Image (spheres, grey):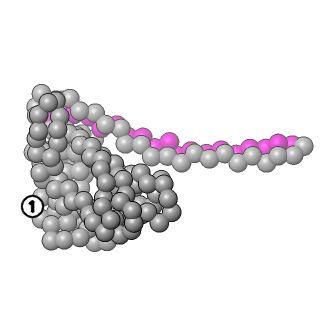
Amino acid sequence: MSDLTVTATISNDISYTIVKLGSNTQSESASLAYSQALTSPTGTYSASGLQINYGVLQSGSVPVSGKVSFDLKAFEKESFGASANISFTKIKSILVENRNTSYGEDLIIGATGTKAFTEPWNNSGGGSIKPYAVWSYSDPISGAVVDATNKEFVIQNNSYPAVLYTAIAVGVTG
């Protein structure tokens, strides 16, 4: 994969405006406007730094009372007309969107199983992703380690109906 140039932008923001109406209209607004660029190394790769060399995108449906599991050491991907198993060694950022739109149609993500990808939750736990919502993890400098015992990322559906998701991850392979 040395013939690839890879760039990614991690961004996260909430923007709000409050307006007080009346004879003397006043307003307040704020935004975090967080954004961090990651790029392929030019020359030697640095284990720490704002560098990546691959990205993956997966969309689908988590069945009722089911789960979808991603092996971050063997992530199946179709790209440039060929199939490949992408073997991450570090995840710099991962994002999961719950694409359902009704109350109660939550997704559960977390560190479960003997080979669970645990670093986003400090080695245990997890969380839920409500409809219309997104969960994200970012460590753009160091990245979360992926190895033989820390590699399975799981999305579960404990509700009815099936829940649509989109997941994207960028990181380092090797």
Dot 1 lies on which element?
Answer: loop
Amino acid at dot 1? Ala
Describe residue 86's horizontal placement relative to residue 163 as left or right. Answer: left
- Where is residue 153 drawn, in percent x and y? 23, 60
The residue nearer to you, when weighing 38 against 149, is: 149
Decide: is 18 above or below 150. above
Q: Residue at x 39, y 68 (%)?
A: 159
- Where is residue 111 drawn, in percent x and y? 26, 68
- Where is residue 156 drawn, in percent x and y? 30, 65
The residue nearer to you, when weighing 17 against 59, is: 59
The residue nearer to you, when weighing 46 against 25, is: 25
Task: Work out which quarter of the rendered image holds the N terminus and state it.
Answer: top left
Q: Which residue is drawn at 9% across and 61% down?
A: 148
Q: Residue at x 50, y 42 (%)?
A: 33
Q: Give the range drawn in magenta.
A: 24-44
Q: How crowded is mark 1: few (under 14 residues within 10 Å), some or many (20 or more)?
A: few
Task: Count up the numbered dots.
Answer: 1
Decide: is 143 above or below 109. above
The residue nearer to you, when weighing 81 against 56, is: 81
Decide: is 22 above or below 81. below
- Is 21 included in the stretch rendered in magenta? no
- Is 30 included in the stretch rendered in magenta? yes
Can residue 75 be seen by looking at this rendering? yes
Q: Mark 1 points at which residue?
A: 148
Q: Based on the displayed image, in which of its 4 quarters is residue 110 positioned? A: bottom left
Describe residue 89's horizontal placement relative to residue 58 as left or right. Answer: left
Q: Which residue is drawn at 37% across and 58% down?
A: 163
Considering every residue shown, the one lying at the far right of the view is 23
- Where is residue 114 drawn, in percent x and y? 15, 71
